Image (cartoon, rainbow, N blue to C red):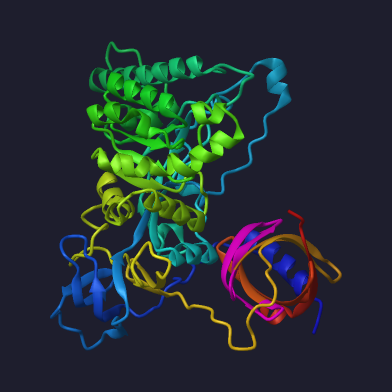
């Protein structure tokens, strides 16, 4: 075994920074025709189809029904123990984004020379430019049934523009479904050292911004039509970025921390005739149901269920707040459903698919019907964002975003066995320990990991163990990389991490033995050889 591995890796990183970006191969199977036979199919267009056949060809659903013919060139999957659902959609999240670090300059504080970016006004910031669709990350989403998501920058007052992705490829150009879909609007001051540094200031600023955009559009239209005798309006990139949203041609999403933000959003939307959604970050929308119904509002419902600081429960102390977070706030989705207010689920506040689905389960346990939960993850987001002709239900001609599960969705027994995104198949193999090889350690938590050798490298590993199955994230000087598919056998662990840089992928294979709070083992990287490593658990 050599210790050249990280000499090679570092050299490769440097080389990749100057090489042209090469296309990535697709994450899914290269075969293009599939037939799932004898499965229960939840089309969501009518009653379930028992012992049905689903045919997928070239990314689309070719046929669906009891007697659908199976093409001769199809690879057949036995669906006798499986249930087919439309793939789940995260209607709004940001954990897939790698936004640049922003550091506030003290020189600006001394000079008072602030710009719009300092104030949290970044309408030109596009989610598409910062999306991270690594193989390990996508696998984590497949595990919980997700095949699509809308992502948005969520910092500041005018936060930036969202994009909608299918989880079919690590190449964002291939995965993109819709670009620049919605514009985020928040009510929190970006920085208390400059205007607007209060809630009243934010409200005034937003009103003025929408007024100015409208005036800019009118002035530009007059100038383009006449030119002669017209003063040419000064170009403003922010106004241009906001134009379609201010005119109601595209929707804005109000990021509301509490019921008071929701009321502010409804007023602003009415005053400027905006096309809009309410993203209920505080789980407080049950407090304003009459106003939401009167406005015919559409809600993106988060499931972190943390009582907002403005709530009575939070103001009465820790015990009352925790009680409300267990007993009151998880009922928010059920109350919206009971009132007939259309809603979809958002991962904002939960940040990863596991905790997101745990939040959805809490909502079901608190009274939300499973049928409504399913709609909030499938048909509703498709309708909300204008992709219902392609997604949300299982029908001939639609995009083949489907999941195949053992057990009904939202039950403890449910496990996703296959996910199709854009018709590409992704297998989710269950890790089962053999007799005598069951885990004797639990490695869940954070670890400091040091690669030995002449160069050496220190990283942090965040591990999540479920029986013999291992997943997690490796945080390196080059970024953070998710992984799944690891195994815990006795006191031994093994996992693979795929690093991605400049469009290239590097696979690292880790294997180690755990003794108490220490892990010792070897990491291998292809022809570059191997190196030893040690890791120590981080307390807490």
Q: Position of residue 535 (x, y in %)?
A: 78, 67
Residue ID at (22%, 89%): 72
Quarter location, residue 530? bottom right
Residue 48 higher or lower than 323, as above or below = below
The foreground one among 130 and 331 is 331
Q: Residue furthest right?
A: 454
Residue ID at (48%, 63%): 138
Q: Residue furthest left?
A: 67
Residue 166 higher or lower than 28, as above or below = above
402 relative to 524 in the view: left or right = left
Q: Which residues are magenta?
A: 466-493
Residue ID at (19%, 65%): 395
Q: Position of residue 338 (x, y in %)?
A: 26, 41
Name the quarter where the N terminus is drawn.
Answer: bottom right
Residue ID at (29%, 66%): 85
Residue 485 magenta-highlighted: yes
Q: Residue furthest top?
A: 229
Residue 40 higher or lower than 106, as above or below = below
The foreground one among 218 and 75 is 75
Q: Position of residue 90 (x, y in %)?
A: 40, 52
């Amino acid at each position: 075994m050599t210790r050249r591995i990280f000499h090679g890796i570092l050299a490769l990183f440097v080389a990749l920074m100057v090489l042209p970006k090469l296309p990535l191969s697709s994450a899914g199977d290269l075969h293009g025709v599939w037939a799932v036979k004898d499965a229960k199919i939840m089309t969501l267009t009518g009653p379930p189809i028992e012992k049905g056949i689903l045919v997928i060809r070239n990314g689309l659903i070719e046929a669906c029904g009891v007697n659908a013919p199976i093409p001769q060139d199809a690879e057949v999957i036995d669906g006798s123990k499986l249930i087919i659902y439309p793939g789940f959609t995260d209607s709004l999240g940001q954990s897939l984004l790698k936004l640049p670090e922003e550091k506030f300059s003290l020189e600006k504080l001394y000079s008072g020379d602030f710009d719009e970016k300092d104030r949290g006004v970044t309408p030109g910031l596009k989610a598409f430019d910062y999306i991270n669709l690594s193989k390990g990350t996508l696998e984590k989403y497949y595990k919980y049934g997700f095949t699509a998501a809308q992502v948005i920058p969520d910092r500041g007052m005018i936060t930036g523009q969202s994009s909608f992705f299918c989880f079919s490829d690590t190449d964002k150009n291939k995965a993109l479904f819709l670009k620049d879909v919605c514009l985020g609007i928040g009510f929190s001051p970006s920085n208390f050292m400059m205007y607007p540094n209060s809630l009243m200031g934010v409200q005034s600023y937003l009103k003025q911004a929408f007024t100015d955009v409208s005036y800019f559009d009118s002035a530009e239209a007059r100038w383009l039509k006449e030119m002669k005798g017209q003063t040419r309006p000064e170009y403003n990139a922010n106004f241009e970025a906001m134009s379609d949203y201010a005119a109601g041609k595209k929707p804005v999403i109000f990021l509301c921390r509490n019921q008071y933000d929701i009321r502010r959003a409804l007023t602003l939307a009415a005053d400027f005739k905006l096309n809009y959604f309410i993203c209920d970050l505080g789980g407080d929308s049950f407090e304003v149901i009459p106003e939401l119904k009167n406005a015919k509002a559409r809600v993106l419902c988060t499931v972190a269920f943390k009582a907002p600081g403005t709530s009575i429960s939070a103001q009465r102390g820790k015990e009352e707040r925790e009680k409300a977070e267990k007993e009151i706030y998880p009922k928010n989705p059920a109350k919206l459903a009971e009132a007939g207010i259309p809603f979809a689920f958002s991962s904002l506040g939960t940040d990863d698919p596991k905790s997101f689905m745990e939040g959805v389960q809490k909502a079901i346990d608190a009274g939300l019907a499973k049928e409504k939960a399913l709609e909030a993850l499938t048909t509703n987001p498709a309708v909300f964002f204008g992709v219902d002709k392609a997604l949300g239900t299982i029908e001939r001609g639609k995009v083949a975003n489907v999941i195949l599960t053992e057990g009904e969705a939202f039950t403890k027994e449910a496990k996703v066995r296959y996910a199709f995104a854009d018709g590409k198949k992704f297998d989710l193999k269950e890790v089962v320990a053999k007799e005598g090889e069951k885990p004797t350690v639990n490695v869940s938590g954070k670890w400091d990991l040091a690669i030995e050798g002449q160069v050496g490298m220190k990283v942090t590993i965040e591990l999540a163990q479920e029986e013999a199955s291992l997943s997690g994230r490796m945080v390196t000087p080059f970024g953070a990389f998710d992984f799944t598919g690891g195994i815990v056998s006795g006191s031994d662990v093994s996992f693979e991490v795929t690093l991605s840089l400049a469009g290239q992928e590097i696979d690292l294979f880790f294997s180690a033995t755990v003794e108490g709070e220490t892990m010792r083992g070897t990491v291998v990287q292809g022809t570059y050889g191997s190196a030893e490593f040690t890791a120590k658990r981080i307390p807490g």
